[in-house]
Structure formats: structure tokens, C-alpha cells
Amino acid sequence: MASIADYYAGKSVLITGATGFMGKVLVEKLLRSCPHVRALYLLVRPKAGQSMQERVSDMMKCKLFDRVREDNPDFHQKIVPISSELIQPGLAIGPEDKETLTSCINIIFHCAATIRFDEPLKHALQLNVMATQQLISLAQQMPHLQAFIHISTAYANCNRRHIDDIIYPPPVEPKKLIDSLEWMEDSIVRDITPRLIGDHPNTYTYTKALAECVVQKESSKLSIAIIRPSIVGASWQEPFPGWIDNFNGPSGVFIAAGKGILRTMRANNDAVADLIPVDVVINLTLAAGWYTAVHRPKAALVYNCTTGGINPFHWGEIGMFLFSFKRNPLEQAFRRPNANITSNYLMNQYWILVSHRFPALLYDLYLRLSGQKPQMMRIFNRLHKAIGLLEYFSSQDWEWNSENMNMLMSHLSPEDRKVQYLQPRPSTYHTAMIATSLQTFSSRHSTLMCVS
Ligand SMILES: CCCCCCCCCCCCCCCC(=O)SCCNC(=O)CCNC(=O)[C@H](O)C(C)(C)COP(=O)(O)OP(=O)(O)OC[C@H]1O[C@@H](n2cnc3c(N)ncnc32)[C@H](O)[C@@H]1OP(=O)(O)O
Ligand SMILES: NC(=O)C1=CN([C@@H]2O[C@H](COP(=O)(O)OP(=O)(O)OC[C@H]3O[C@@H](n4cnc5c(N)ncnc54)[C@H](OP(=O)(O)O)[C@@H]3O)[C@@H](O)[C@H]2O)C=CC1
């Protein structure tokens, strides 16, 4: 059977979300480990005054692409940016571009999504569900398509404790929900959102669950796989250890703690912190693309991409790393860092009052008296909102079944297992990830986390 790199040779690949955290790593790995891939078509929108071409060429200058650049200085010739706004009808792809895509694409990787936990429901539905539906409609017009790989999240079914690698029935029929919200004013949708999402913690996990159902509906017509990563962290090995470009999840907590702002947070010290390195997720994604295209499974296969079952790491252990900030605070720290993790709600509220609100009040008073604009209370209000949204995930435990991931691994040749490694050794990974993250945060330019 063809190796993974052999399979991708000569193939045209369509990627959404290529400018995002995981999308960039996917583009890089494809170019580096599958050097004979024919072309990567990236659906990109113009943003912040930059055209899509400017955005893509800026992206390719990033340090992440150094190794690809070394191997093949002309790698950019394989990248074809296509203008697309995924929440517009027809994904806002021009007729000529559409013709090109339908005539040549062999594999689709759908990474784009809004990952914000506070996204208004209508927007989260438009991007995470309706855009997925539209992309599937486009995929159905592609005669040479061999695999459609949808990136979901391990938390799409976080209202369950044990999560199998199956697609669960939707909390509501996605089409009915979309139709009924269409005519409603945004303020009404906002008011009824908690009732609609029910036992989901936010609109993100809710809409990702709905998107899986949309994908499943088409699984008899297309060869589909769903990848469900847990909390995606910095790279473990490739293209170099410690690469990350965002403040999501634990990263934002580290920075706030390192600056002495965050001094208390609710987390269950004994609960598993299911972090997975971005390079492992991308390796699994590429391997799943290969397997889906070569074996053409009849129904969509779901890959839970998690680490907790292999060698669990706990929030308490991550909390220990926060102590290192005591000796090495980040620059311009508000106070000497001393973050405390507790599972006790009342204790946390007490420390919020004593260690967050009270010092903020005093500092704002000082700013006012010295003729400056008060700002600390505003910062803390934002921080409290953010950690309030994260606490759901750091206070509970989940158990994921990884049968399909093990099955996939058993199908890889020894050579592919080396290139597309699928299992990090968590103790090694977590220590390395946190150490490199802390190193970056401690560096002078800690706003962009690009560690070498
Ligand atoms: C022991 C330890 C316990 C740890 C305990 C952690 C638990 C961690 C559980 C996660 C569990 C995920 C489980 C689902 C995993 C998925 O399936 S997908 C990934 C999950 N998604 C996320 O993590 C996104 C969550 N974040 C959000 O929803 C929003 O960021 C929040 C929390 C609502 C905050 O929104 P906001 O206040 O509007 O701030 P935001 O827009 O994020 O940032 C504003 C600006 O500040 C910057 N910024 C943000 N944070 C910082 C920072 N710390 N420093 C400097 N600048 C910052 C941003 O880059 C942004 O800059 P611009 O882009 O505007 O230039
Ligand atoms: N990060 C994590 O911890 C986890 C992520 N996931 C899943 O992985 C996938 C990728 O996540 P991640 O890379 O972290 O997310 P990012 O937020 O970093 O990237 C999101 C991507 O989607 C694109 N996008 C958003 N809105 C639109 C739009 N309207 N039209 C076109 N493109 C759009 C963004 O483009 P632009 O640059 O133009 O904004 C960006 O490329 C998502 O499906 C997410 O649910 C799953 C588990 C964990």
C-alpha cells in the first residue's frame, strides 16, 4: 500500500482555516512531509486591510515555514490562495475559482471555525454549521474528491462524561434551528441562547456538535472523517518544539499568572488536563486523510484525538508550573506572581475579592489621584469573564474512546509511524510544552509566542 507521502503526491488539496493556528501547521507539514503534493488551495478572506494574497505571503514568511523554505525555496508556488468568506452564500467563491476547485480537488481539510466561547449563537451557527454545509455541497460537485476531513473538537459532546468515537444524535435538528433563528432579532436570540444550548457550556461546543451531524448526513455520499482534538497546545517536535501563536486555553492563563494579575483560579487539581500537541493533531489529520481516501469507509469515522487515556497529566501538575513565575515574573508585572489553583468555589470567591478586586480598586484609586485613567478594574472584569468561561473545562474529567485512533495507527507502515507520529509521551510533552511556553512568556517580546 502507498505510504502517506506517496498518496499525497500529485494530489490537489483544499484547506479552510489555513491562516489559523492549526491550519498553518497543516500547510507546513503537508509541504514538508509530502513534497510531491501538487497544490494547496487555501480558502482565505481579506482581513484587517490586507488582501488575501498579502495575508498568505505574510504567513509563508513566518518562522514556522523555515524548514520548508530550506528544503524548497520555491514552495510558495504550490500555494494557491482563493478568496472566500465562509459565511457568505456560496462561500463567496468566484465562478472561475469554483470551476478550478471542482475540477481538480482530491482532498478537503475543513479547519475553519469560530473557537470563541462567547460567540453569539447566530454567528457561531453561520460559521461552524452553515459554512460546513455549504462546503459539503461544494464537495459533492467535485468528481475527483477522495476524502473530506472535518476538524471538530473532543468537547463537541462535553455534556457526556464518556465519549465514544461515534457521532451522537444532535441536540436539535440543525436545519430547523437555522430556519427558526433566521427571522429572529439578535437580541431575542441572545436571550434564548441559554435555553437552546441546554447542557452545553457555550455556543462553540453546541455548534460543533451540530456541525458533526451535518457532516454525518453526507457520509454515505462522500468519504468522510471527523477529527476531534482535545485542548491543542504548542508543537511537541515539529517543525520545532514549542511553536504556538495564540492565547487560547491555558496560554492566556499562564500570561495573566506570570504578570501577577491572576492569583486565583478554580480548577480540579485531580482532573485530567487533556492537552495535545498541535503537530500530533496534524499528523493524525493527514493520516486520516490518507486512510479515508485509500479505504473509503462506508460511514464517517470519528477520531478522538486525546492524551488523557495514555498517560494522564493533571491540572494540579500544571498549577505547579505557575510557581516558577514567583522567581521569574514576566516583565511589567502588576504584582509579584503567586497564583493559587483551588477547586473550592467559596475559597476562590474569597481570593478573588482579596487578591484581585481589592488591589485593583486601590490601584485605580492611585491612578485617579495621580490624574490618570483607571484601568485595573476593567482588566480584572475581562479576566474574570475569561476564566469563568474556561473553568467548566478545568473542573471536570472526561473519558474518550480511542479505538479508531489505535486502528489507524495499526495501519501505518513503520516508516509512516516515524514521520506521522500519533502519540506524544505526555509527561515529556507537557513538561516541554510548558517549559518552552514559560520561556517565551518570560522573553522580552512575549506577545507573539513563536519559540525556537
Ligand atoms: C493550572 C492552570 C489552569 C489553566 C486552566 C485553563 C483551562 C483551559 C481550558 C480550555 C478548554 C478548551 C476546550 C475546547 C478546546 C477547543 O475545542 S477550541 C479552542 C478553545 N477556544 C478557546 O480557548 C477560546 C477561548 N477564548 C475566548 O472565547 C475568548 O478569548 C474570551 C475568553 C471570551 C476572551 O475574549 P476577549 O476578552 O474579547 O479577549 P480576546 O478577543 O480573546 O483577546 C483580545 C486581544 O487580547 C489579546 N490577548 C488575549 N489574551 C491575552 C493575554 N493573556 N496576554 C496578552 N494579550 C492577550 C488577544 O490576542 C487579542 O488581541 P487582538 O487579536 O485583538 O489583537
Ligand atoms: N485550538 C484548539 O485548542 C482546538 C481547535 N479545534 C478545532 O480546530 C479547528 C482550527 O482551530 P484553530 O486553528 O485553533 O482556530 P483559529 O481561530 O486559530 O483559526 C480559525 C480559522 O478559521 C478561519 N475563519 C474564521 N472565520 C472565517 C470566515 N468567515 N471565512 C473564512 N475563514 C474564516 C480563520 O481565518 P481568519 O484568519 O481570516 O480569521 C482562521 O484561519 C477548528 O475547527 C476548531 O474547532 C478543536 C479542538 C481544540
Image: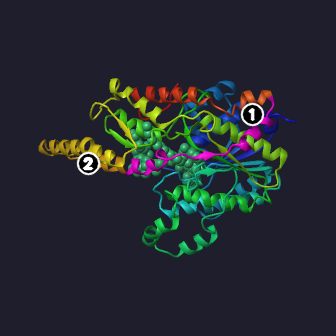
Residue 156 in the figure: left or right of residue 385: right
Q: Is residue 94 visible?
A: no
Q: Is residue 133 visible?
A: yes
Front residue (pair 200, 182): 200
Quarter of the image holding residue 308? top right
Q: Answer with the quadrant where ligand 1 appears in the image.
A: top left
* Disc number lying in front (1 or 2): 2
Residue most extreme to the right? 1
Q: Which residues are magenta?
A: 385-413
Front residue (pair 346, 114): 346
Q: Residues within 10 Å of mark 2 (few under 14, many from 20)?
A: some
422 shown above or below 18: above
Residue 385 in the figure: left or right of residue 395: left
Q: Which residue is mark 2?
A: 377
- Asked if the beta carbon under badge 2 is closer than 8 A to the nearest atom of ligand 1, the reply is no
214 shown above or below 291: below
Front residue (pair 378, 317): 317
Q: Amino acid at mark 2?
A: Met
Q: Amino acid at mark 1?
A: Cys
Q: CA distance from mark 1 to mark 2?
A: 51 Å
Q: Which residue is mark 1?
A: 34
Residue 407 in the figure: left or right of residue 341: right
* Image location of residue 272, percent across then percent down: 53, 40
* Image location of residue 321, percent across then percent down: 43, 29
Q: Is residue 78 magenta?
A: no
* Image location of residue 130, percent across then percent down: 62, 63
Residue 443 in the figure: left or right of residue 134: left
Q: Is residue 410 magenta?
A: yes
